[in-house]
Amino acid sequence: MSMIQTLYDAILNGNAKAAKEITQTSLAAGGNPQSLVDDTMIPAMNEVGRRYEANEYFVPELLIAARAMKASLELIRPLLTARGAEPVGRVVIGTVQGDLHDIGKNLVGAMLEGAGFEVIDLGVDVSPEKFIAAAKDRNARLVALSALLTTTMHSMKAVLEKLREAGIRDNVKVMIGGAPVTQKYADEIGADGYSSNANAAVALARKLMAA
Amino acid sequence: MHALLQSLLARRPVVTDGAWGTELQKLGLAAGEHPDRWNLSHPGRVEEVAARYVEAGSEVILTNTFRSNRIALGAHAADGDVAALNARGVEISRRAAAGRARVFASVGPSGKMLMAGEVTEEELSAAFTEQCHALADAGADALLIETMADLDETRIAVKAARTTGLPVIASMVFDSGKEKDRTMMGATPEQVAAALTEAGADVIGANCGLGIEGYVPVCTRLRRATQLPLWIKPNAGMPEMVDGRITYRTTPEQFASGARELRNAGADFIGGCCGTTPAFLRAVASALRGES
């Protein structure tokens, strides 16, 4: 079995230790960091996502795969940065004001990191002002909002309003998610996208960055 | 079996209660406001919700303490909060029950994920032990660990609850997978039944996440997998946004007919979760009693 195949398997099976070791060995042997990411690691995460969509994988498998990806990326990212490569995108993520739930938000964050995004996690109970400040200061092009409660999802609307007031609505894309959130709600408040799970969130983030 | 459970189950199925959060909102709880805080700031309104369920025919009512564990309270917790919120919660429900209903104290999830390293087993165990003892000391009749997504966390909570000596009900959400028959972490009803029976739960259950038609097959499978009594509390369907307002489509009549199916599928305790109201429980009580 080739080295590449085993890194693919290590990520698919969520073996962070193996993923890290194989990445180290491969880089030491002169492997191209960019092609490791593009040709092996991202396809592995895509397969993880496919299995999740097909109900072959559940949240635990998703989480450990994202961690293996992250372990490998931590070795590769400095090399890419040194070559002048930018991350896929920079995203500010958080659970909206009044809401303390962070499981969904953390899952989406982990999957986005696994897909090569730089994730700035603002935590839970995040005020609209904090989202706006972070998006501005860190020059993020993507803002991801999470809410678990029907009573807090309306804070999402406030974030969009504040982005408009701050005059930076056109500079960022806003994606939303969480148990009570729907595509219809996203349309209603003028968000750029909605996803129903952490895997779909990655596809959506890529789409929004390409738009 | 605990004597209390035995006496309740002599006339099974037992009618439990419905949703609290949405009822509190009708009484003025603001969006984003912590519902459990009302045990201290608006005890009269919390008691009103409890009393409406007793009046509707609930033989078991819960407490407004779902989020009152140290971890879920998070940054909003001050010293003494856990003890006060839980003690007041039990007192309020006991007052509302006035001897006509039993008070099962509600314990919800921590909101943190064990396997992601957001919280340790020791922290979970300490938080659940603290909350369960506060509830037991205040006079709860039983402890209900509910709306759980992670089997490992549930097991830890059951063990903590058992140290009080009270009956322990453990109820998980089944809302994942193609057939909507798995927990968020992928556990099947069979796996849940086996693990929670082994952990020492006195009653096993399912709540939230699905409407009543979704929980009939889950209940059937739990029934085959354990000898223990079953606790089921479905939602009033799934929430939909209509004109910017959260709406549940299921009617009390539809819910009551689903409750009969649940009884036939082996449910011993039947009530409702999100979106259900005293009208739902009144319909359930009359549907189930009317036949017995």
Image: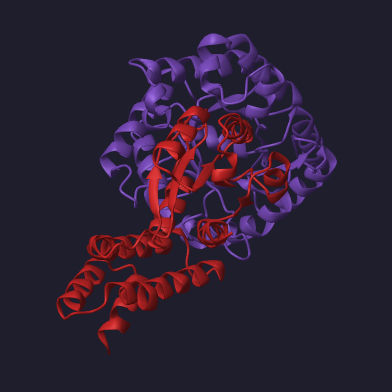
Chain colours: A red, B purple
Q: Residue at x 67, y 23 (%)?
A: B25
Q: Is residue A118 above or below residue B292?
A: below
Farthest residue toward the bottom?
A1
The quarter of the picture where residue B224 lies is bottom right
Residue B292 in sight here: no
Question: Residue at 38% across / 57% down in the picture?
Answer: A113
Residue B114 seen by the camera: yes
Nearer-the-camera pick, B60 or A158: A158
- Residue B67: x, y in percent? 48, 29
Q: How many badges with numbers are in the image?
A: 0
In the picture, the quarter occupied by the C terminus of chain B is top right
Horizontal side, residue B14 vs residue B114: left or right: right
Residue A198 is situated, as x and y percent measured from the top left of the image, at 50, 56
For residue A107, above or below residue A170: below
Residue at 80% over, 36% down:
B243
Q: Nearer the viewer, residue A74 or B11?
A: A74
Place of residue A8 in the rendered image (x, y in percent of width and height, measured from the top left) = 34, 77
Q: In front: B141, or B47? A: B47
Outermost residue on the left side: it is A28
Q: Quadrant of residue A31?
A: bottom left
Identify which residue is drawn at 22% across, 63% down: A75
In the rendering, at what x and y percent does residue A35 appear? 33, 77
Left/right placement of residue A204 relative to residue A81 reads right
Q: Nearer the viewer, residue B12 or A76?
A: A76
